[in-house]
């Protein structure tokens, strides 16, 4: 009964939160499920409203939670847009019949790796995974160990309890890392790597933004994080650095429109906006992300894709085996 009450309360709150409608002839409110940080979401939606007059409400939550909502609500969506999340999650939602196909006029200049063939998702910034390091804490804890430079370096038993990695069941950041190891090493060696690393991890938070924050504040010496997230903390004066190991993984943060939305035209305008030079440069200025629009420039300090040694990432395989991989992770990693 308690569980039913919690579910009912959640549905009621969401219905109330997303109950916005047009008033006095004003434009109908656009509703966004956002996986990217609240600061960026607020800045982007404010600019969109300023440019179009269309008001926006958003709900910020983790990737796993919001993708599950999108799939479960596909007949009667409570939002119009899914903003953020790696491509494998949008493929999952598309395969479940939860996404609307839309090819923006601006998508013609987007690289092929950053857009779906059926138009159900389009990337707006590049995501790369690396090792974040709090140099002060690291030097205090491991004065005789050089900074890690490769993924294998993280397996040093001395690091036990000093690594933070998000929970891949909830976070697209960690699932991208898991696929990084499975695809670069193969299934057997990849799982050997992951099961060797897991006991060294001190915390598995759900939020993809947590490792950069926990490294920045000095609670852990090491963490697996999006590279741009660590660079942002470094720009704010935290004593952190980031290493992009050889054979790391690259993907894209994506945007999709919900199937059966009743605000389709406004949703299409928001997709167009997110693919624009102005929106992608705004996001990069806040979060050091790498734009996919070739006309947009990443802010000074962001890491150019060309400087990275990336694996040939198979996003379709990552999406197809996600349930199996996460079930195995949940059963083996306690």
Image (cartoon, helix red, strand yellow):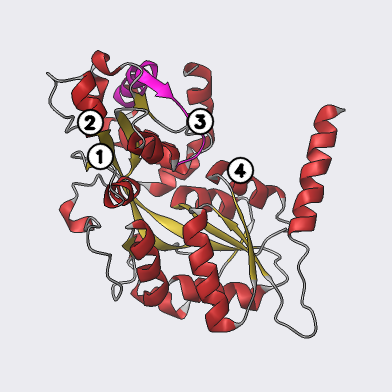
Q: Which residue is mark 1?
A: 239
Residue drawn at point x = 38 percent, y = 16 percent: 199
- Looking at the image, do the residues carrying marks 1 and 2 touch, with CB atoms under 8 Å apart? yes
Front of the two marks 3 and 2: 2
Is disc 2 surrounded by few (<14), some (14 to 19) or many (20+) residues within 10 Å?
Answer: few
Is most of the magenta stretch helix, strand or loop? Answer: helix
Which labelled disc corresponds to residue 108? none
Q: Residues within 10 Å of mark 1 (few under 14, many from 20)?
A: some
Was residue 5 drawn as part of the magenta stretch in this picture? no
The one of 246 and 192 positioned closer to us in this rendering: 246
Residue 325, percent across and down? 47, 30
User: Which mark sits nearer the N-terminus, 1 or 2?
Assistant: 2
Query: For numbered disc 3, what is the local secondary structure?
Result: helix
Q: Position of residue 181 (x, y in %)?
A: 31, 32
Q: Is residue 258 above or below residue 193?
A: below
Q: Write down the residue under mark 4.
A: 65
Give the answer, above or below, for where 200 lies relative to 79: above
Image point (43%, 48%), residue name: 316
Q: List the residue tagged with mark 3.
A: 326
Residue pointed to by mark 2? 136
Mark 1 or 3 closer to N-term?
1
The disc, 4 or 3, on the residue closer to the chain's N-terminal end is 4
Q: Please state if 48 lies on the left or on the right of 266 as rendered.
A: left
Give the extent of the magenta segment.
189-208
Under tag 2, what secondary structure?
helix
- The local crowd at label 4, few if under 14, some if 14 to 19, many if 20 or more residues have their Cα within 10 Å, is some
Mark 2 to mark 4 CA distance (whole Å): 35 Å
- At a point 79% along the width and 79% down the height, the residue shown is 23
Secondary structure of residue under mark 1: loop
């Amino acid at each position: 009964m308690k569980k039913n009450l919690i579910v009912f309360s959640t549905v009621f709150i969401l219905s109330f939160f997303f109950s916005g409608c047009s008033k006095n002839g004003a434009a109908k409110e656009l509703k966004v499920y956002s996986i990217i940080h609240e600061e960026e979401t607020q800045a982007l939606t404010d600019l969109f409203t300023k440019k179009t007059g269309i008001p926006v409400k958003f709900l910020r939550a983790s990737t796993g939670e919001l993708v599950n909502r999108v799939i479960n609500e596909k007949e009667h969506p409570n939002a119009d847009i899914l903003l953020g999340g790696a491509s494998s999650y949008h493929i999952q939602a598309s395969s479940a019949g939860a996404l609307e196909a839309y090819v923006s006029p601006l998508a013609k200049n987007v690289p092929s790796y950053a857009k779906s063939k059926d138009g159900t998702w389009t990337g707006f910034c590049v995501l790369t995974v690396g090792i974040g390091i709090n140099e002060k804490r690291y030097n205090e804890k491991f004065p005789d160990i050089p900074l890690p430079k490769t993924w294998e370096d993280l397996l040093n038993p001395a690091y036990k309890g000093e690594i933070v990695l998000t929970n891949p069941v909830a976070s697209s950041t960690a699932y991208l890392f898991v696929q990084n190891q499975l695809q670069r090493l193969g299934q057997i060696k990849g799982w050997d790597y992951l099961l060797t690393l897991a006991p060294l991890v001190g915390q598995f938070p759900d939020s993809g933004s947590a490792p950069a924050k926990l490294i920045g504040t000095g609670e852990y010496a090491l963490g697996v994080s999006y590279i741009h997230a660590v660079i942002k903390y470094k720009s704010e004066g935290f004593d952190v650095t980031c290493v992009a190991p050889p054979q790391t993984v690259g993907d894209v943060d994506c945007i999709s429109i919900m199937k059966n939305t009743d605000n389709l035209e406004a949703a299409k305008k928001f997709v167009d906006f997110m693919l624009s030079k102005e929106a992608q440069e705004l996001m990069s200025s806040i979060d050091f992300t790498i734009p996919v629009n070739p006309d947009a420039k990443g802010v000074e300090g962001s890491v150019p894709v060309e400087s990275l040694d990336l694996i040939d990432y198979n996003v379709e395989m990552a999406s197809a085996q996600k349930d199996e991989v996460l079930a195995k992770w949940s059963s083996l990693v306690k």
